[in-house]
């Protein structure tokens, strides 16, 4: 790991003992800015030997950034929260070990929304991540993995590893013109990743093109006995064989378009680009069909009821004396949570909503209804895809992939807001509720040069077919 610190000093990404805060749109230095005089020559030689070895491995010494909610033994893992600002993990996340074992050079951690709760990559610990669209105006990068997307967009990293609970990888990637991939739930180990909502959290990948995403995914798509939600070797083989059995090369690719998702809040230029992409599909011999996914329109409400409740459970551990910042006795009155003030307003808001949805005990109608609606969303997707669900009772359809915009409207300048901002992830949440693989790819520009993103969704376990199809366009 000390070698990685030297790599980082060479590229000017961070100084010794300082974690990058992902203000990388202004802190990207050139080689002329670097000073190597204080690095011992034997350390440089060691690094060069290490890099030569890494170049023979799958990732070939490529530079990788990771989200700040992924545990490392030599850097703090704060999840961008004041509560964990000085926490150093005694172990490393499985994905960190896999990246380094396969030739990846992890150069630092990226900014995020506190505990991955948010859509702006803005927190009190590190500040805000943004990207420049014009010389004098900064734009929102989205969240919660906004630092990941920014590091790739700024050419600081070959790829970045984030987490996607309800669009947190795909949304920032779309905003900055990168590729954002959320695999099927359980494909990549989450051991060592600080959780938000354990039934939806998925490790995702941001890169400049789909081929780069595939390279990283091949490294991380492995079983892990340390993570009970990570698919076993046997389950992976069953799923892969199942998907392969129903694949056909004798007919054109059938792409479904959910007409229910053409809602009034969608920006006209987003709709225009969506239609352009559908025309491109048809010109390539694909068959485009309309499908109905009406229950998915309730995705944001379902997500809020379930994810926020799970967040209450997962974040409760940080009031334990073992973790988190400590305060002097007597600083607060008895009965007052001594750490609640260390949480940002967005986290407090979500935990209050989650606690409310859990506050009715066994008669909790909110949570039960949300679970039933989540199953209804999953059933809708299963009815659409040609590959049947492994739950044999579910009917199937004839669609290979589903295509939607990645957002209702493009990113906005810092400080701008509108009454429909809460709908920003409405295109992304449904596939998260169903655990499906989905990818956002860049598709031209809109609104004066802002990136446009298109989302492709596949049946559960059909990740590699999704990536192969997406390579046609990026």
Image (cartoon, grey):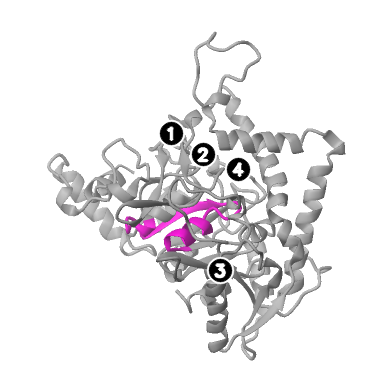
Q: Estimate the spatial distance between the alpha carbons at disc 3 and disc 1, rounded to whole Å.
A: 37 Å
| Residue 390 seen in the figure | no
Whether 288 is among the magenta residues is: no
Q: Looking at the image, can residue 136 be seen?
A: yes
Within 10 Å of disc 3 (Cα), the crowding (few <14, some 14-19, many 20+) is some
Please tell me how crowded label 2 is: few (under 14), some (14-19), or many (20+) other residues with Cα within 10 Å.
many
Residue 171 is covered by the magenta coloring = yes
Quarter of the picture containing the N terminus is top left
In front: label 3 or label 2: 3
Label 3, on which residue? 268
Q: Count the marks: how many?
A: 4
Report, in whole angstroms, how far the alpha carbon at label 1 lies from the one at label 4: 18 Å
Instruction: Indicate left or right for 440 with 337 as reference.
Output: left
Residue 196 got which mark? 4
Residue depicted at x 57% and y 38%: 346
Quadrant containing the C terminus is bottom left
Front in this rendered view, residue 1 or 304: 304
Residue that mark 1 sits on: 125
Mark 2 vs 1: CB contact within 8 A: yes
The residue nearer to you, when weighing 236 against 249, is: 249
Q: Nearer the viewer, residue 214 or 218?
A: 214
Choose the circle earlier in sequence order: 2 or 1: 2
Task: Report the Cα–Cα distance between label 4 and label 2.
Answer: 10 Å
Q: Report the magenta residues as a range.
A: 152-179
User: Secondary structure under badge 1?
Assistant: loop
């Amino acid at each position: 790991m000390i070698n990685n610190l030297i790599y980082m000093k060479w590229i000017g990404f961070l100084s010794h003992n300082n974690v990058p805060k992902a203000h990388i749109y202004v802190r990207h230095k050139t080689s002329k800015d670097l000073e190597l005089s204080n690095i011992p020559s034997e350390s440089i030689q060691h690094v060069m030997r290490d890099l030569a070895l890494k170049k023979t491995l799958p990732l070939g010494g490529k530079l990788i950034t990771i989200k700040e909610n992924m545990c490392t033994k030599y850097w703090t893992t704060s999840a961008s929260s004041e509560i964990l600002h000085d926490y150093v993990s005694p172990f490393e996340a499985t994905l960190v070990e896999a990246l380094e074992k396969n030739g990846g050079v992890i150069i630092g951690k990226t900014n995020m929304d506190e505990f991955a709760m948010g859509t702006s990559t803005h927190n009190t610990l590190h500040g805000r991540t943004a990207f420049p669209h014009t010389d004098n105006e900064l734009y929102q990068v989205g969240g919660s993995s906004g630092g990941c997307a920014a590091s790739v967009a700024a050419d600081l990293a070959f790829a970045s590893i984030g987490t996607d609970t309800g669009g947190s990888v795909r949304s920032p990637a779309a905003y900055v013109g990168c590729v954002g991939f959320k695999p099927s739930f359980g494909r990549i180990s989450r051991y060592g990743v600080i959780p938000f909502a354990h039934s939806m959290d998925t490790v995702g990948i941001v890169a400049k093109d789909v081929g780069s995403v595939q390279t990283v995914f091949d490294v991380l798509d492995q079983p892990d006995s340390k993570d009970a939600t990570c698919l076993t070797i046997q389950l992976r083989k069953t799923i892969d064989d199942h998907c392969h059995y129903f694949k056909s090369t004798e007919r054109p690719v059938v792409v479904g378009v959910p007409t229910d998702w053409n809602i009034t809040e969608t920006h006209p230029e987003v709709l225009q680009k969506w239609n352009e992409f559908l025309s491109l599909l048809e010109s390539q011999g694909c068959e485009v069909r309309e499908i109905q996914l009406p229950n998915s329109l309730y995705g944001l409400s379902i997500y809020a009821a379930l994810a926020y409740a799970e967040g209450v459970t997962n974040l409760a551990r940080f009031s334990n004396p073992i973790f988190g910042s400590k305060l002097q006795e007597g600083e607060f009155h008895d009965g007052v949570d001594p750490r609640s003030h260390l949480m940002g307003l967005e986290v407090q808001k979500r935990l209050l909503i989650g606690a409310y949805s859990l506050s009715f005990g066994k008669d909790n109608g909110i949570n039960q209804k949300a679970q039933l609606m989540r199953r209804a969303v999953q059933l809708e997707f299963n009815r659409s895809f040609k590959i049947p669900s492994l739950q044999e009772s579910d009917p199937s359809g004839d669609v290979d992939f589903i295509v939607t915009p990645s957002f209702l409207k493009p990113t906005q300048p810092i400080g701008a807001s509108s009454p429909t901002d809460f709908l920003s992830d409405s295109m992304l949440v449904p596939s998260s509720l169903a655990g499906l693989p989905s990818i956002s790819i860049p598709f031209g520009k809109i609104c004066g040069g802002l990136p446009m993103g298109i989302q492709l969704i596949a049946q559960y376990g059909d990740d590699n077919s999704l990536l192969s199809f997406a390579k046609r366009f990026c």
